[in-house]
Image (tube, grey):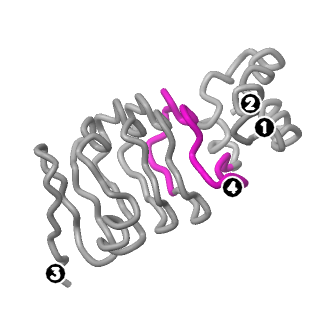
Amino acid sequence: MVPKLKAFIEEHIDLIEEKRWQALYSYATAEIPFQIGNLSYNLLQAGINPLNDLNRVLPEMFRDSMINELVIPEDITRVQREAFKCCYFLTKISLPSSIVHIDDTAFVGCYELEDICYQGTTTEFIRNINPTIRMFRDTKTARISCSDANIFIDFDGTVSVEEKII
């Protein structure tokens, strides 16, 4: 990542909130037209987690990103529409137990996503998120690894739990 971009982002980090995310992107593109196309990815590469001061993953926040792994911070409660749309390189994501909603379109086009880890229990995941096959329809697997067991979501929408053998 270009040092100028890192300095720019650090100077304008207060703009990273839901209503101003697109404004930051537009402003950064105008100010630094090179290497800005993948803003969320570039922020992470610069050691700045754009999720740190938020309580949700914003719509289209990582769309088309080259990110391959992500640990979502504990304060995040929602993953909104198309948050990870077309993240073709995303293979692993860790979801905190604080999440209570994942939009059905959050992972559309994440064809390589195969390692979905949830930090809470299966009961918490099912109760809080109410998973459907639509949430993970484009991923390599519909298996969510929880702290106590694995959850499988079949293509007919059936949710089953397989206890982990320790």
User: Which residue in the structure is indicated by mark 4?
Assistant: 52
- Side of 130 relative to 63 (left or right): left
Of circles 2 and 3, the one toward us is 3
What segment is highlighted magenta in the picture?
49-71
Q: Is residue 79 magenta?
A: no
Q: Amino acid at mark 4?
A: Asn
Extreme residue in the bottom direction = 166
Find the distance from the CA under tag 3 to the CA under tag 1. 45 Å
Camera-nearest label, 2 or 4? 4
The spot of residue 111 in percent (x, y) is: 29, 34
Residue at 76%, 26% (x, y): give it: 23
52 falls in the magenta region: yes
Are the two marked residues, 1 and 2, in contact with CB atoms closer than 8 angstroms? yes
Please name the predominant secondary structure of the magenta segment in the image: loop
Q: Residues within 10 Å of mark 1 (few under 14, many from 20)?
A: some
Per the model, the C-alpha gap separating discs 1 and 2 is 7 Å
* 71 relative to 166 in the view: left or right: right
For label 3, the residue is 165
Q: How many marks?
A: 4
Image quadrant for the N terminus?
top right
Location of residue 25 in the rendering, given as x and y in whole percent from the top left corner: 72, 26
Mark 4 → mark 1, Cα distance in angstroms:
16 Å
x, y (%) of residue 3? 79, 34
- Specify which label sits upstream in the sequence, 3 or 4: 4
Mark toward the viewer: 4 or 1: 4
Q: Look at the picture and state if 62 lies above or below 131.
A: above
Say what secondary structure mark 1 lies in.
Answer: helix
In the image, 32 versus 128, the foreground residue is: 128
Any mark on residue 2, and which? 2
